[in-house]
Image (cartoon, rainbow, N blue to C red):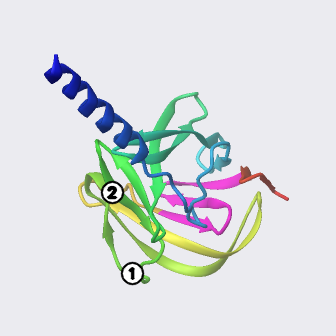
Amino acid sequence: MKKLFFLVMILGFYSCSTDSDILIPEETSEFFPLQVGNRWEYISSLDSSIWKYEITDTKVFNQHVYFERVLTFSDGTKETEYFRVTDSNVVLIYYEGEDYIYIDFNRAIGEEWNSYDDFFGFIRQRNITTTVEAGTFTNVTEVFMDNRSYADIFSFNRYSPGVGLIEVFRFRFNLSLVNATVNGINYPQ
């Protein structure tokens, strides 16, 4: 009986300590705003279809809180990804049980990082001005992403401070921000 009581006490202590060790995100990247309810709509140059991104929930993996981002294509198909931001302004993606760098906004221009599934990226340019249907944005940072194993899946992604992704150039088509609600602010304003 003493052994059983001791085992229950240890398990109770461990489970309490595990819950309290969950790391709540304290920072968000100014270029990658993560808040439940944020949403973005893009128009595709390929067929004028609308692609929607939305931060729908938070999930805990490996004692870290991740924001669930759901991409809904015009046909209703959905793709879900999980992100968090470190205190050093690095956006991490949770992929197959591990963290990978998605974007490191602090890297020098041209300095590569490796990501998940043979993807890599680098900051291509900073402080540019970009005009899309949702408005004109300044201090935009352009991130190049590609895959070492597959040809023609590269993209040039433009991020505006406080808004997030505003434009994507891919092989054969691009996406352009039409409207968004980010941290309670609507675009276009």
Residue 54 place in picture, x, y as percent: 61, 42
Q: In the drawing, what numbered circle is on residue 154?
A: none
Q: Nearer the viewer, residue 155 or 108?
A: 108
The quarter in which the C terminus is drawn is bottom right
The quarter in which the N terminus is drawn is top left
Residue 9, quarter of picture: top left
Does label 1 or label 2 sit earlier along the sequence?
2
Question: What amino acid does circle 1 point to?
Answer: Gly
Q: Is residue 78 above or below residue 36?
A: above
Query: Horizontally, is 6 left or right of 178 in the view?
Result: left
Residue 94 place in picture, x, y as percent: 37, 48
Residue shown at 58% from the left, 27% from the top: 76
Residue 13 place in picture, x, y as percent: 31, 36
Mark 1: secondary structure: loop
Mark 2: secondary structure: strand
Residue shown at 56% from the left, 80% from the top: 126
Residue shown at 33% from the left, 53% from the top: 99
Question: What amino acid does circle 2 point to?
Answer: Tyr
Residue 122 place in picture, x, y as percent: 40, 72
> Mark 2 highlights which residue?
100
Residue shown at 64% from the left, 40% from the top: 49
Query: Horizontally, is 34 left or right of 14 in the view?
Result: right
Q: Are marks 1 and 2 in contact (CB under 8 Å)?
A: no
> Mark 1 highlights which residue?
110
Please report the bounds of the magenta region as a residue range: 156-179
Q: Nearer the viewer, residue 58 or 68?
A: 58
**Residue 175 within the segment the image draws in magenta:** yes
Residue 8 visible to an observer of this rendering: yes
Q: Nearer the viewer, residue 70 or 37?
A: 37
**Most common secondary structure along the magenta stretch:** strand
